[in-house]
Image (cartoon, helix red, strand yellow):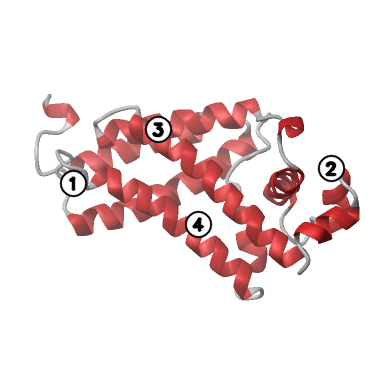
Amino acid sequence: MTDTALGTRDRIVQTTSRLMQRQGYEGTAIKQISQEARVALSSVYHFFPNGKQELGIAAIRHADVEFADILREAMASTDDPAEAMVATAELLITHLRNSDWLDGCPITATALETASRIPEIQQAVADTFDHWRTLIADKLRAEGAGIAEQDAHDLAHTVINTLEGAELTAQVTRSGEPLEIAGRHLARLVDSYRQGPTRCDR
């Protein structure tokens, strides 16, 4: 959806999310948000009367939904949970390339600089990571996947942690290789936990 097709509030939130993704919460000022979103400063405070923290939480929730949509698309692309790991990595590479390697994980910068300092922001970030892990775990524990409940929970943590690191490295190196490698190895890891036939057996 283009900026012109968005309502004022949605444009403010989307702009804030993109700016926080690239420069963090502390580096994103309300004035810059209003300029980038092409709205009056008074409009920002109209929709977010409690200021930057309220807007920051809304931006994190927006980022949560955007990244969750990427995960859902990748998870839905194949019935095989191991192949879904490769598909996720490939989709993340596509999004990174399309942004000229600027837009990696939408909450990493905010998570690092606000940890243990702004509890409300920290909680929003923690909820976001939990949501992403749940999407992965649901795929891993789906009927026919052959992965036990606790293993699916643990693997979901590993998947998100690995993709986070690989995505950051891909941005720094401007290369999809870190994510390609991560996707392949996550697929092998998922296969190793399966109680039924693996990709290698078929």
Q: Which residue is drawn at 36% across and 53% down?
A: 134
Q: Residue at x 73, y 41 (%)?
A: 7
Q: In this rendering, which labeled residue sits more in front, label 1 or label 3?
A: 3
Q: Residues within 10 Å of mark 2 (few under 14, many from 20)?
A: some
Name the residue nearer the viewer: 182 or 82: 82
Does residue 29 show up? no
The mark that comes first in sequence, 1 or 3, is 3
The mark that comes first in sequence, 1 or 4, is 4
- How far, Cα to Cα, is label 3 from label 2? 31 Å
- How far, Cα to Cα, is label 1 from label 2? 47 Å
Tag 1 and tag 2, C-beta contact below 8 Å = no
Q: Quadrant of residue 191?
A: top left
Residue 36, labelled with which disc?
2
Residue denoted by label 3:
74
Residue 193, labelled with which disc?
1
Residue 128, labelled with which disc?
4
